[in-house]
Amino acid sequence: MSPARVAVMAATIAVLALLAIGLVELAGSSSSPATRARLTSAQMRARLRGSPAPLAALHAQAGQLLPGGVAAVRARLAALRGRPVVINKWASWCEPCRAEFGAFQGASAAWGRAVAFIGIDSADASRAGALAFLRSFPVSYPSYYDPSGQAGTAITDSSFTPVTVFIDARGRRYIHQGPYPDQGKLERDVRRYALDA
């Protein structure tokens, strides 16, 4: 065999090996928490029963789309001062946002007794579309309707979607650009940036 033919065969084997590794990882990711069975509203309520009053107030508004824009979001954050907060900016038309909602559903149910979760439905032209999505994929916290995108940009310092902002009990902020691939990664960031653990 010529050296050139050996090099081509070696390169082909290397590409096939990388492809096989990628397929194995892809198959493993299909069982990630973001793609597992969704929690029902009743299951989330049961997990969050007994939450402190400010967090219980958020759970009482689970899945709602609240009005008020940036002023309302800032007022809610002021009421939560001294508590860890996770803010997720999303939109129903945003495929990466929709893909990460399972991670937020699971993480908010797991950590919602210690961490406040809030959504901002940013730049969604249709309130009906956002509500339909929230009905099909319930979460344990409310979102603020932000059709202009101004509240989302003001709170997250970004015009990108999705964006997640972590605020620890001392008010320090960390901004994560882009979607969360799974609940585990989101929960690690909740511990690291919101709970300062």
Image (cartoon, helix red, strand yellow):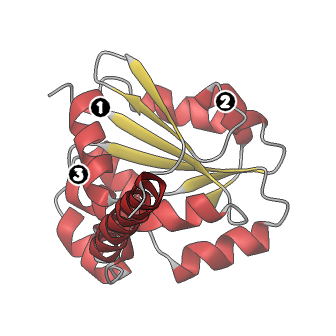
The quarter of the picture where the N terminus appears is bottom left
Tell me: residue 65, above or below residue 70.
below
Name which of mark 3 and mark 1 comes first in the sequence. Answer: 3
Q: Residue at x 71, y 44 (%)?
A: 68
Location of residue 152 by image quarter: top right
Q: Residues within 10 Å of mark 2 (few under 14, many from 20)?
A: some
Location of residue 43 by image quarter: bottom left
Q: CA distance from mark 3 to mark 2?
A: 25 Å
Q: Residue at x 42, y 24 (%)?
A: 174
Q: Residues within 10 Å of mark 3 (few under 14, many from 20)?
A: some
Q: Nearer the viewer, residue 49 or 95?
A: 95
Left or right of 77 in this view: 54: left
Left or right of 111 in this view: 54: right
Query: Mark 1 belongs to which amino acid?
Result: Ala
Question: Mark 2 highlights which residue?
Answer: 158
- Which circle, 2 or 1, is nearer the viewer? 2
